[in-house]
Amino acid sequence: MNAKRKPKKTLWPVVLLVLLGGWVVGEFYRLPTVQTVRTAFAATEIEVSAIWYADVDAYGEIKGKKAQLR
């Protein structure tokens, strides 16, 4: 065993953090304004609120119910 040997440092955590940071900055830079984000959330909420799901009661009959968000 060589006591003066330095521990080998790997470079992959630094590369991973740089890539992740660049992706996050790129995603936020891609969105022009806060209004775009609000519009996207509003559109998603409308789509989700329009989803119908099937509810089966005790007798096995399927009743359509509208998903409630609020």
Image: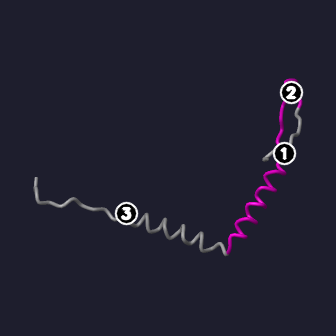
Q: Secondary structure at mark 1?
A: strand
CB within 8 Å, label 3 to label 2:
no
Q: Is residue 55 above or below residue 49?
A: above
Q: Report which quarter residue 36 is drawn in.
A: bottom right
Mark 1 or mark 2, which is nearer the start of the sequence? 1
Residue 15, which numbered label?
none
Where is mark 2, residue-wise?
60
Q: Is 40 or 57 nearer to us in this picture? A: 40
- CA–CA distance between discs 2 and 1? 18 Å
Task: Report the mark closest to the observer, 2 or 1.
Answer: 1
Q: Which residues are magenta?
A: 33-61
Residue at position x 79%, y 47% from top? 70
Q: Report which quarter residue 66 is drawn in.
A: top right
4 relative to 18 in the view: left or right: left
Q: Secondary structure at mark 3?
A: helix
Kind of residue indicated by mark 3: Trp
Where is mark 1, residue-wise?
52
Q: Is 63 or 40 nearer to us in this picture? A: 40
Where is mark 3, residue-wise?
12
Residue at position x 76%, y 58% from top? 44
Expressed as whole percent of the image width and height from the top left, the position of residue 34 reads: 68, 70
Mark 2 or mark 3, which is nearer the start of the sequence? 3
Q: Would you call the spot at circle 2 few (<14 residues within 10 Å), some (14-19), or many (20 or more)?
A: few
Q: Secondary structure at mark 2?
A: loop
Q: Report which quarter residue 35 is drawn in.
A: bottom right
Kind of residue indicated by mark 2: Gly
